[in-house]
Image (cartoon, rainbow, N blue to C red):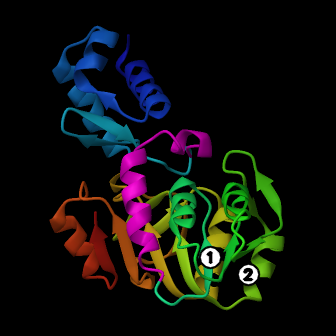
Amino acid sequence: MAAEERRRQIVRVARRSGSVDVGALATELGVAKETVRRDLRTLENHGLVRRTHGGAYPVESARFETTLAFRTTAHVPEKRRIAAAAAGLLGDAETVFVDEGFTPQLIAEALPQDRELTVVTASLATAGALAVCDRFTVLLLGGRVRAGTLATVDHWATRMLAGFVIDLAYIGANGISRAHGLTTPDPAVSEVKAQALRASRRAVFAGVHTKFGASGFCRFAGVGDLDAIVTSSRLPAAEAHRYSLLGPQVIRV
């Protein structure tokens, strides 16, 4: 197998499985472990994967975006810890924006249900999960529904958001980096996220460690626009500190 085809196969496996292991790839591809390590270094230099000890995981980009169905199976214990910590930042907020995606959905489900709360969301899954709570008023943004994420976009959604003043926004992203801020592959998604931030008094980004250092096509916020970042302890403390120097509180759980 030629090097280019081997690397394409590595990316396909990483995107299908959520991560790859050097030893398993070497066996599957019939090459030495050092050959796989060189391939992973090359793929990382091209922004397609992020290497870890013994393997790598795929990086979302302008060309690749995972579906909601995939996100419900990847890093789930980590996402639940992050969601619980993010929900703990609710404070005295009475109106909340919950972004599309699985981690924001987990945040929504972790919000205290013993108080009145208005939740605005573009996510059909989040709206459905919260609609059963008697004390929550759930506002689902209108617009075109994206098949992969089951979330609404386009001018219907942004016009609704422009008419609100929201206490707290829980924001997700496909990537977050100190150089490029918060990014996502789709311009329509980017505009909904940007409008949600403009409408909100406070903003919290919640995401797993794999989001950090990655960047997509559309930038919708800078790190300094956030009040807090909630992630897992798998993000190194030194890197978390570098993000905190840009303004937000960084919480590792």
Residue numbers of the magenta segment? 65-90
Q: Residue at x 51, y 90 (%)?
A: 92
Q: Dot 2 surroundings within 10 Å: few (below 14), some, or many (20 or more)?
A: many
Residue 25 is drawn in which quadrant? top left
The quadrant holding residue 156 is bottom right
Residue 66: in sight, yes or no? yes
Q: Is residue 78 magenta?
A: yes
Q: Dots 1 and 2: beta carbons under 8 Å?
A: yes
Residue tagged 2: 161
Residue 207 placement (x, y as % from top left): 42, 60
Q: Is residue 214 visible?
A: no
Looking at marks 1 and 2 on the same chain, the residue that comes earlier in the sequence is marked by 1
Magenta: main secondary structure equals helix
Residue at coordinates 39% horizontally, 83% vertically from top-left? 224
Image location of residue 60, percent across then percent down: 48, 48
Query: Considering depth in this image, is 116 or 34 the residue closer to the camera?
Result: 116
Quarter of the picture containing the N terminus is top left
Which amino acid type is shown beneath numbered disc 1? Phe
Q: Position of residue 12 (x, y in %)?
A: 48, 27
219 in magenta: no
The quadrant in which residue 117 appears is bottom right
Identify the secondary structure beneath mark 2: helix
The label on residue 97 is 1
